[in-house]
Image (cartoon, coloured by chain):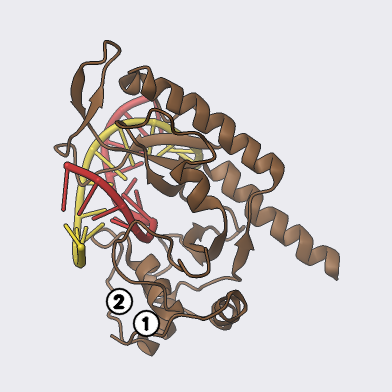
Chain colours: A brown, B yellow, C red
Amino acid sequence: MKIHPRPTSEAELIQRAATIAGYSFKAIATHIDLTIPNDLRREKGWVGKLIELYLGADAGSKAERDFAHLGIELKTIPINQLGQPLETTFVCVAPLTANHGITWESSHVKYKLNKVLWIPVEGERDIPLAERRVGTPILWQPSAGEEQQLKQDWQELMDMIVLGQIEQITARQGEVLQIRPKAANGKALTTAFNEYGEPIMTRPRGFYLKKQFTAQILNNYLNQVTQQN
DNA sequence: TTCTGATCATTT
DNA sequence: AAATGATCAGAA
């Protein structure tokens, strides 16, 4: 497995991402000498790792952005043939304890989403993994309106957590941001608090962007491109 | 067919 | 256990 050097500038990162647009996973995996699984059932993060390695993201599972020195978070997003997202997008773990005094401004969600390099990838399961292709990269920063939507959902969900209503939170809540389980399995437990302030054990949760929201991001980009022509 | 809740691999 | 990378798959 070959490791690429990390890009030294935003322009270099985008340039490098643009060079793999249109290429298959097989071509990229061959280039960095990474073996391709038959499917993603047992390696759900494989595509993310593939793109990370190629683009030279900071390796490992640190609680940092992928390109910390550039302030950029990398996200691959599986899309169908119409360019629509097939999955929600994980943002970060939801803080179930030690969350008093956290504001939207100081939240991990805002930090992570400050600047994102989206890499659309073909994700339909009838396409063999090796044949799926990478799309055009999109560097995104939330607009004022998008940030307002995120902030509103975040506030509503965090209020429930702080009030000890974690077990009442459902993925149906939130216009653009939702909370769902995020764990190795159902046996993984972490501490939270109930409505009486008593500690309880519950499944770890994560913040996810709903598909409708990421679809808008991708779509806005398409509109920009078509307006230039 | 869509979406929520569950799950997989790896590293620290 | 918690963080990284996410998608799977049964229920609705």
Residue at image position (32%, 87%) is A2
- Observer-nearest of A26 and A220: A220
Crowding at dot 2, Cα within 10 Å, few <14 / some 14-19 / many 20+, comes out as some
Q: Position of residue A173 (x, y in %)?
A: 48, 26
Question: As drawn, which residue projects farthest toward the front?
Answer: A101
Q: Looking at the image, can residue A93 be seen? A: yes
* Pointers 1 and 2 in contact (C-beta within 8 Å): yes
Q: Given the image, on which type of amino acid does mark 1 rest? A: Ala
Whether A100 is drawn above or below A56: the answer is above
Q: Earlier in the sequence, mark 1 or mark 2?
A: 1
- Observer-nearest of B11 and A182: B11
Residue at image position (59%, 42%) is A212
Numbered label attached to residue A36 = 2
Numbered label attached to residue A155 = none
Whether A176 is drawn above or below A90: the answer is above
Q: Chain of mark 2?
A: A
**Callout 1 and callout 2 share a chain:** yes
Q: Position of residue A25 (x, y in %)?
A: 42, 77
Which residue is labeled 1 in the image?
Answer: A29
Crowding at dot 1, Cα within 10 Å, few <14 / some 14-19 / many 20+, comes out as many
